[in-house]
Image: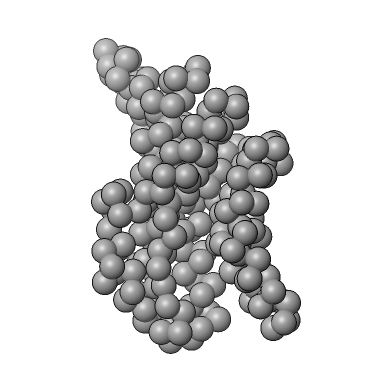
Amino acid sequence: MDGWQTLLLGLPVLVLSVVVHEAAHAWMAARQGDPTAALLGRLTLNPLPHLDPIGSVLVPALLLLGGAPFLFGWAKPVPVDPRRYRHYRRGDILVSLAGVGANLLLALLFALLLAALVWANRWAPGFDVSVALLMGMARVGILVNCALVVFNLLPVPPLDGSHVVAHLLPPRAAWAYRRFGAYGLIVLLLLTAVGLTGWLGVPVRWLTKGALGLVRLLT
């Protein structure tokens, strides 16, 4: 696919994926005893409360214009109050990893969709154009969600991976590490500008090959 095809197929998939990611955070926070996100209207699949101008628009556009091999981005962080978790450490880790888990699940669902479309294309060749379009979107969905998994596990505050790392550090180091989160967005933009996608390529390709391997197994 060329750049414009990737944009047309990738942006809707990216929006869906980051919205599901944030809604998963909100859902898990409620499960852990904190209804803050739900009360503020973030426990929803409506994209409007979630989308972030920088992470949902600017960064994907820069990646596309820069010829990146895949798109990724983020939405507005879900507001949570960890003090309301029934178990602070466990709750914070589970809420942080819920978004990554949601993207892994989406990658699996897109893989299953792609496998179903391969079978549909064999048995109903008259639908070649529409099936080909959906197959392209499913492939992009696998790639985008694998990229989101890897990206969000980076130990850069405020990404999800940083919450897990903070709980593994001694208290003083964890406090300093969390304070670094005020500069996290600047760091992410700088890393993107200097070719972050190149560093992420290996684990993203590994996950994507695994998902496509499942498709081949099923077809």
The residue drawn where x is 32% and y is 76% is 35
Taking the image as shown, residue 112 lies to the left or right of residue 160, namely left
* Relative horizontal placement of residue 36, taking residue 218 as reference (left or right): left
Count the marks. 0
Indicate left or right for 166 with 129 as reference. right
Residue 169, given in percent of the width and then of the height, sits at: 71, 76
The quadrant in which residue 128 appears is top left
Q: Residue at x 35, y 27 (%)?
A: 134
Q: Position of residue 218 (x, y in %)?
A: 46, 36
Q: Residue at x 62, y 59 (%)?
A: 183
Residue 213 in sight from this viewpoint: no
Vertical arrangement, residue 105 with respect to residue 215, above or below: below
* Display colour scheme: one colour
Spot occupied by residue 47 in the image (x, y as percentages of width and height)? 30, 48
Q: Is residue 35 above or below residue 75?
A: below
Q: Nearer the viewer, residue 129 or 215?
A: 129
Q: Residue 137: horizontal and vertical position, in percent? A: 40, 30
At horizontal 27% and vertical 13% (from top left) the residue drawn is 126
In terms of depth relative to the viewer, which is nearer, 55 or 141? 55
State whether residue 99 appears in this view. yes
Q: Which residue occupies the foreground of this view, 60 or 133?
A: 60
